[in-house]
Amino acid sequence: MFAVIKTGGKQYRVAADDVITVERLSVEAGESVTLTDVLMLANGDDVKVGAPVVEGASVVAEVVEQTRGPKVIAFKKRRRQNSKRKRGHRQDLTTLRITEILADGAKPSGKKSTAKKTAAKKAPAKAKAAEAKAADAKAAEADSAGDTAAEQKSA
């Protein structure tokens, strides 16, 4: 059984236990993600083509790692104009291992299954981290101020 899925503006042909590299998904390594944009399902001679997606079909994948692609350099030079531009780019990528392909609205059998996480869920965690950093900075500032006051009294 295989499926054609769409993620990151590209289409991929996947089967169970395949490892693919897609554009970055905001999911931590080790978690599962459910991809619902299934364009086609095939099981032997039984083929279902979606219009545009197959209803009730999904693909469950485990995130292996978050990585980056190779460095791509865009260099443009205009001859005899003393003009050139050099820009580099590295694409953020996610490596996925396909665990199962589900049809007809079946539920995933895996332990952990999460839908695509949104940035809204991550925002409170980032705010807490920023608050903790600010508290640490204040504590360090207070310690250094206390040390200088003690030094001035002893002198």
Image (cartoon, rainbow, N blue to C red):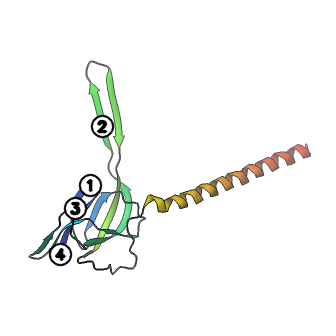
Looking at the image, which is closer to me, 88 or 114? 114
Is 68 situated left or right of 79 in this image?
A: right
Q: Where is residue 9? Give x, y as percent.
A: 26, 54
Dot 2 surroundings within 10 Å: few (below 14), some, or many (20 or more)?
few
What residue is drawn where x is 30% and y is 69%? 97
**Label located before the other in sequence (3 or 2):** 3
C-alpha distance separating marks 2 and 1: 22 Å
Q: Which residue is mark 4?
A: 1
What residue is drawn where x is 33% and y is 62%? 95
Q: Where is residue 76? Give x, y as percent.
A: 28, 30
The quarter of the image holding the C terminus is top right
Q: Which residue is mark 1?
A: 9
C-alpha distance separating marks 3 and 1: 10 Å
Dot 4 surroundings within 10 Å: few (below 14), some, or many (20 or more)?
some
Residue type at numbered disc 3:
Tyr
Residue type at numbered disc 2:
Ala
What residue is drawn where x is 36% and y is 66%? 64
Nearest to viewer (mark 4 / mark 2): 4
Q: Which residue is mark 3?
A: 12
C-alpha distance separating marks 4 and 2: 40 Å
Whether 67 is drawn above or below 33: the answer is: above
**Label located before the other in sequence (4 or 3):** 4
Q: Secondary structure at mark 3?
A: strand
